[in-house]
Every structure is written in C-alpha cells, then in structure tokens.
Image (cartoon, rainbow, N blue to C red):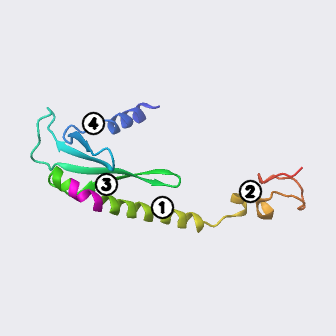
Amino acid sequence: MTDAETQETLEQLTVDADGLYQEENFTDRRVGSIQRLTPVTRDGQPDDSRPVLYLGNTQVMTPVGGLPLNFELDAGSLEEAVAAFPAAAQAALEQTMEQLKEMQREQASRIMTPDQMGGGMGGMGGGGAPGGGAPGGGIQLR
C-alpha cells in the first residue's frame, strides 16, 4: 500500500467525533428490536441540538433462511417507536421484495453472448463442431 493509499484509508476509518450517538437496544425477544440512538458530544454528554433516532430490526423467515430487515422509525419516543414498528417493518419488507424482484428481472433480461456462454454451439464447447476441442471453456465430452 502506498503512503497516499494508507492516508486515504486512515481518513475513511476516522470516527466523526461530531456525529457520535449512544446506542440502546430494546427487544421483546420475539418479533424484533428497537435501537435508540441518542446524540452525544465528544465528551459523551447528551447533544440536544440533534434529534434522537429510532431504528427497527427484525427477521422474516423465507424458504432459503432468515431475511434481516432494518428500518428507520419515525418516532419521538420509545412508545411511538413501538407503535410505528409493525407498519415500518411491513414497508421495509415490501421494499426489499421489490428490490429482489428487480434484481431477478435484471438478471433474466441480460443478453448472453457466445463468449459468456462458454463458446459456440449453445455453450456446449465443440462437441462435434468443426475444429473439435473446447477452447471456449465449454463442456468437454469424452
């Protein structure tokens, strides 16, 4: 790593002393958790000039395993965060599902060239085609 790269990495890893938050977690141990982020000053004292933030976390089971959901809660207190949790979790799930569908559509619409498919003959590499062999990286039959 060059000195410039090292310096850039160190700058990226520097903690923003003016953007510190104290984290507190609340959970029902069943559905999910709520994280309260209280802004603090450099010396750890409450910073009343910035708002307290609430974040929700839950997990939805899918056929391939758990899908974590993380979302902001529009709330001014823990009580409001608890009340906002179900609707925010549902919105996060819907948004995640839409993103997954979009990714599937993008993959399905990709145009494959013979090079990407591993050579000529529909990706079968040369099984009987003029020239024989499998230079395109296709399947080689013996």
- The residue type indicated by label 4 comes to Val
- Nearest to the observer: residue 84 or residue 127: 84
Residue occupying the point 34% across, 39% down: 12
Look at the numbered discs 2 and 4 and tell me whether their residues touch, using CB distance below 8 Å. no
Disc sitting over residue 118 in the figure: 2
Q: Residues within 10 Å of mark 3 (few under 14, many from 20)?
A: some
User: Is residue 130 left or right of 70 when viewed as pictured?
Assistant: right
What kind of secondary structure does the magenta stretch mostly adopt?
A: helix
Mark 4 and mark 1: span between their CA atoms?
33 Å
Q: Residues within 10 Å of mark 1 (few under 14, many from 20)?
A: few
Whole-percent x, y for residue 80 in the image: 17, 56
Say which label, 1 or 3, has the lower sequence index.
3
**Residue 140 forms part of the magenta stretch:** no
**Which residue is identified by label 1?**
100
Mark 2 and mark 4: span between their CA atoms?
47 Å
Look at the numbered discs 1 and 3 and tell me whether their residues touch, using CB distance below 8 Å. no
Disc 2 is placed on an element classified as: loop
The magenta segment is 82-87
**Which residue is identified by label 3?**
71
- The residue type indicated by label 3 comes to Phe
Mark 3 and mark 4: span between their CA atoms?
23 Å
Look at the numbered discs 1 and 2 and tell me whether their residues touch, using CB distance below 8 Å. no
Disc 1 is placed on an element classified as: helix
Whole-percent x, y for residue 86 in the image: 29, 59
Whole-percent x, y for residue 109 in the image: 59, 68
Residue occupying the point 14% across, 48% down: 50
- Residue 75 found in image quarter: bottom left
**Which residue is identified by label 4?**
15
The mark tally for this picture is 4
